[in-house]
Image (cartoon, rainbow, N blue to C red):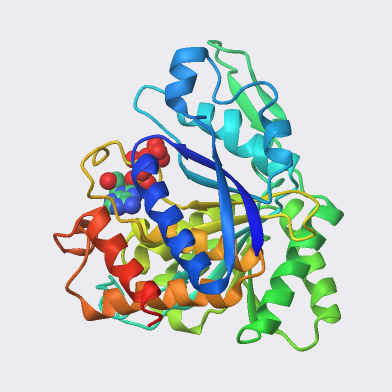
Amino acid sequence: MTTHDIAVIPGDGIGLEVTPAALEVVRAAGRRHGFTCQFTEYDWSCERYKREGAMMPPDGIDRLRGHDAVFLGAVGAPGVPDHVSLWGLLIPIRRAFRQYVNLRPVRLFDGIESPVNAAIDLVVVRENTEGEYSEIGGRMNRGFPGEMAVQESVFTRAGVTRVLDYAFDLASRRRGYLTSATKSNGIVHTMPFWDELVEERAREHPGVRWDQEHIDALCAKLVLGPSRFDVIVGSNLFGDILSDLAAAVAGSIGIAPSANLNPEREFPSMFEPVHGSAPDIAGRGVANPIGAIWSAAMMLEHLGHPAAADEIVAAIAAVLAKGDVRTRDLGGTAGTDDFTRAVLTLITEGR
Ligand code: ATP
Ligand code: MG
């Protein structure tokens, strides 16, 4: 039997509640599909930061290196600035393991109320290692009249090309349509470069229809007519904004999954729900586990079990369509465990 060695970082807040739910679903899928997963838990979190002054130990990256994949719940805590969890854990992992693709599928499931009344089935491909999220820049003349801040973006030919190629390939395996998010009318160096590379890569993928949209117009179109989108590719910042917007349009941030992929598989990839630690509802057993469970399904697909992954997503869809078991963010009264058990029942029965 195949065994996968998974690093698990439950993190903080509802991360501690949705992670066990996701792992239980993975175990059940493994029993049906003939694989097992060995989970090694790491307590890296904002709680650890408060105790020890760091999100993870100095050799954290090396300890993750040997695993087949990393599963992360959520990190964040009141009183700990967001940049601590971002720069102390998430960004180092994404960069060290060259997880340059951040994949965020968005679907409007039957039975979910959405602010828009339209079918939605799209994937946001976000560039995950460069772009606007750079450390280059600085603050000058602090406290003086000429005070200013400068923040540089970094777009490399290699970095943009590889994420575009991933997005075009993905589109060719889906409905064959790619939309590139740009802003080359206002951002006059990096965005025209991005656009040129999109045109160049498009020539290598003649089977994919493509378009580009300015980020502002694209946000409006995602709300007004999301059905026509298939794969949307964007820079680190644009991809981040688009995926939260798309997740909200699809009903709840609690549903949205994500994968931080190293497509070449030189290093482990990392799977995590899009939502944060949600301190406002943490510890009450009411968090929606769908984002975590769907992220775990993406992990199984990456590990070579597409049938198991499809079955998990189908089980989520079936429970939502039936409508009797829903968490509060979706207008129901069910808890995390109730929803998880409903999904487990369908998987165990092979439905
Ligand atoms: P963090 O600082 O960790 O990012 P946050 O509160 O800023 O936390 P989220 O955790 O994403 O951001 O929460 C945003 C809102 O969505 C909160 O009101 C939260 O309760 C709600 N929410 C997020 N995830 C879920 C979930 N899985 N189930 C139900 N509600 C959720
Ligand atoms: Mg937040």
- Rendered-image quadrant of the N terminus: bottom right
| Visible residue check, residue 245 | no
Q: Picture quarter containing residue 235?
A: bottom right
Q: Residue furthest left?
A: 333
Closer to us: 122 or 339: 339
Q: Position of residue 266 (x, y in %)?
A: 81, 52
Q: Picture quarter containing residue 137?
A: top right
Q: At 36% across and 78% down in the image, what residue appears?
A: 349
| Visible residue check, residue 45 | yes
Q: Picture quarter containing residue 11?
A: top left
Q: Position of residue 125 (x, y in %)?
A: 62, 64
* For residue 78, above or below residue 196: above
Closer to us: 48 or 125: 48
* For residue 250, above or below residue 293: below
- Rendered-image quadrant of the C terminus: bottom left
* For residue 22, above or below residue 172: above
Q: Residue furthest top?
A: 143
Closer to us: 302 or 40: 40
Q: Is residue 252 left or right of residue 52?
A: left
Q: At 25% across and 78% down in the image, what residue appears?
A: 111
Q: Position of residue 70 (x, y in %)?
A: 60, 47
Closer to us: 112 or 216: 112
Q: Is residue 279 left or right of residue 8?
A: left
Q: At 73% across and 42% down in the image, what residue appears?
A: 66
